[in-house]
Image (spheres, rainbow, N blue to C red):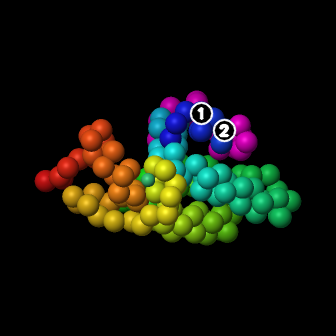
Amino acid sequence: MKQELQEKIFTRFPWTRPDESDTKSPYTLFQLECGDGWFQLLWDLFTEIESLYRSRDTEIQLTIGQVKQKFGSLTVYIHDALPEAYEIVNRYQTLSETICESCAIESSIQQRHYYFSTLCDPCYEKRLQARAIPRRIE
Ligand SMILES: [Zn+2]
């Protein structure tokens, strides 16, 4: 995700900002490792997590291990969170399979050239041309 969009998220949700001292965490290394099309999804996901903790009158206590696109869906690994937080994360993972990871239009998860993605056709072509997607995985 574009740096400026990531910064918007980290500013609005300071608890999502990667811990720079944890230099081995994939989250510190790669931060929000998905396309710009999922910005709103992450925004809404983090908003719901905030509401959940607010409804319990507790500070947000959880660790983000990684945020990335995996097999075409938004994958967020969290640890030490309230059980309901994992349910929120799972719900957004399913939702991401209907939204183009790159431009946010309605899309669907599909396998093309052995590669799973949730990209609309034009975005998929663009990535192919940019060689950001392997044409074939042997
Ligand atoms: Zn698209």
117, above or below 91, in the image: above
Please give the label number shown on residue 8: 2
Closer to us: 81 or 117: 117
Q: Does the magenta stretch include residue 6?
A: no
Q: How crowded is mark 1: few (under 14 residues within 10 Å), some or many (20 or more)?
A: few
Q: Is residue 78 left or right of residue 11?
A: left
Task: Give x and y (percent) for residue 46.
Answer: 67, 54
Mark 1 near ligand 1 (CB under 8 Å)? no
Q: Is residue 13 magenta?
A: yes
Residue 22 location, x and y as percent?
Answer: 55, 34
For the image, the number of numbered tags is 2
Q: Can residue 66 be seen in this view?
A: no
Residue visible at 78% across and 60% down in the picture: 51
Mark 2 residue type: Lys
Q: Is residue 43 left or right of residue 138?
A: right
Inspect the image, locate mark 1, and give the three-letter code of the amino acid beneath it. Glu
Spatial separation of the CA atoms under disc 2 and disc 1: 6 Å
**Label 2 Cα crowd, 10 Å radius (few <14 / some 14-19 / many 20+):** few
Q: On the image, numbered disc 1 is attached to which residue?
A: 4
Residue most extreme to the front: 122
Kindly check if marks 2 and 1 are in contact, taking CB atoms under 8 A apart as contact: yes
